[in-house]
Image: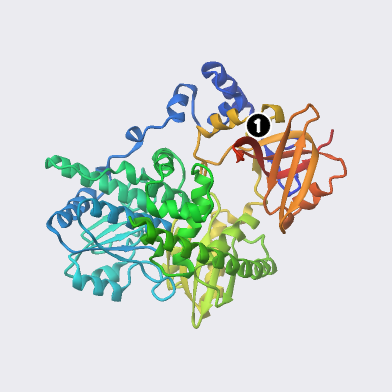
Amino acid sequence: MTGFLGVSSSATGRKWIGPSAEDDRLSEAMQQATDLPMPLCRLLVRRGVNAEDAAAFLEPQLRDLLPDPRSLKDMERAAARFLQAAKSGEKIAVFADYDVDGGSSAALLLCWLRAMGRDATLYVPDRIDEGYGPNVSAMQALAKDHDLIVCVDCGTLSFEPIEAAAGTDVLVLDHHLGSETLPAAYAVVNPNRQDEDGTSSHLCAAGVVFLMLVEVNRQLRENGATGPDLMAMLDLVALATVADVAPLIGVNRALVRQGLKVMARRKRPGLVALADVARMNSAPSAYHLGFLLGPRVNAGGRIGKADLGARLLATDNLAEAHSIAERLDQLNAERREIENRVREVAMAQAEERGVEAPLVWAAGEGWHPGIVGIVAARLKEATNRPAVVIGLDGEEGKGSGRSVAGIDLGAAIQWLVSEGLLLKGGGHKMAAGLSVARDKLEPAMERLSELLARQGAGDAGPADLKLDGVLMPGAATPELIEMIDGAGPFGASAPAPRFAFPDQKILFSKRVGETHLKLSFGDGLGARIDAICFGAFDGPLGPLLEKHNGARFHLTGRLEINTWGGRQSVQLRLEDAAVSAN
């Protein structure tokens, strides 16, 4: 079947898929009913929104979408125990994962407690020395000096470590996939427990922590007291939701939208300092959270001191915030250098094994555990296959995996643990971590590939490129983009709309740095649009468009507003191109 605009194989080897005839019909009907622009109607139809619900979708209200915290098992029990500890001055420890979700979750609890005049001990395990989640020695040490330990973004599978905290109550606030049994904690609140119905399974850990604090505040009100302002803490929930690649649907979308508004007020010292070192010069967006702020918060847990991210997000001291933000910025730059070196070797290794297999994987001596997940994501993006990257050290390897839509990597890795091929492992459908004995590396990866093949992982070719319709340069205005942004924020499970500009002439092109390309294009009717293609020279797009020789192209990508010198202009973030047959 011919692709959209006749593109069956683009410059990047992909088939373009446009709106279906049914989508076209529904979009036209929505435009007539709502008077919204057709490009926005197409996007809403793609999201499954009907005309009657369009207004509510464009202005989501958190009060309408937030689930009742008590719908989650153990929630009332967990909230009551946490509140009891806070009110009676018990010693509380927060054991957090070392990523953005763990740091944000910890900061939520620490800030809530501070507002109540209480403090808590923060404990974040070292990625290399201790690995992911609670460990026996840390839990035993914390149990000696604390009355309550709250594990955030971890703990659901930590049977032995939680048992080691005997004599101290442990709360688990998590979202990682659970097994058929639960650890011996006082309460385990997790929408991905086996006995949950899955309604809130898309929440990240910070979302679960936020729900618990909603319940805590409710219990306070029932006793005639008032709790801290939770709406002011939504910047932390938004950051965690985007950085943890949680789907931006339902309540997650409302949490992020409201959280971005809170962040724009620049009231949290840590996020202000981080935005400044990242040179953010516009109002925060989901893009900023995912690509500027998130990686810097993560840098501490990846290659630096594990608790830096959580401390930054929790601090109310401006000087401390700026000091930590500067350090995280430096660590992030170091992380990029390490990642680039490992990525080249990993890609070469994967290509040698064959990137058509159900699983793409690579392993290397001394590869830093903090960057294997990022490299796995790069391999996944390049091959459209689930990818695992492992750093070997002595007789053991620690790795991380990333999956593609429709393939449950976390469940497959848990199955390998049960078969004894992995030492440890777990995670989500789309991301997972693992530990493997060196002598079982090859059979473990062979078995994982077999399990993923059963789910259809080897069937995919280059991912088809889905487009939301056609636009001409003159119709792509800042006003239209602002209206389209009302359907956002965009991210996981809610991609920004992608439009095609047919039969365009390249008016200007210039290589930027080593791999990027800037260009301008137009249709010959006077209007022109600037475009940027990141990583263009890592593939075929850069050479094709730089040496265009006057050819005309169909161009596609995502529209954004570029603010420079107080002026706004439209920019296309170019993703693909095809030579026009006209």
Residue 491 visible to an observer of this rendering: yes
Residue visible at 14% across and 40% down?
222
The residue carrying pointer 1 sits among few (fewer than 14), some (14 to 19) or many (20 or more) residues within 10 Å by Cα, namely: many
- The colour scheme is rainbow
Label 1 SS: loop
Q: In which quarter of the image is the N terminus?
A: top right
Q: In this view, does 382 lie to the left or right of 424?
A: right
Q: Report the front residue among 261 and 73.
A: 261
Task: Relative to 334, say whether 525 is above or below.
Answer: above
Against 473, is 7 above or below?
below
Q: Where is residue 518 in the image (x, y as percent from the top left)?
A: 72, 47
- Compared with residue 65, is residue 317 higher up or lower down, i.e. above or below? below
Residue 182 picture location, percent across and down: 28, 61
Q: What residue type is labelled 1?
A: Gly
Please provide percent x and percent y for residue 532: 69, 46
Left or right placement of residue 275 versus residue 234 in this view? right
User: Could you say which is closer to the camera, residue 552 or residue 333?
Assistant: 333
In this view of the protein, can residue 408 be seen by the observer? no
Say which residue label 1 marks.
469
In the displayed image of the protein, which residue is found farthest to the right?
549
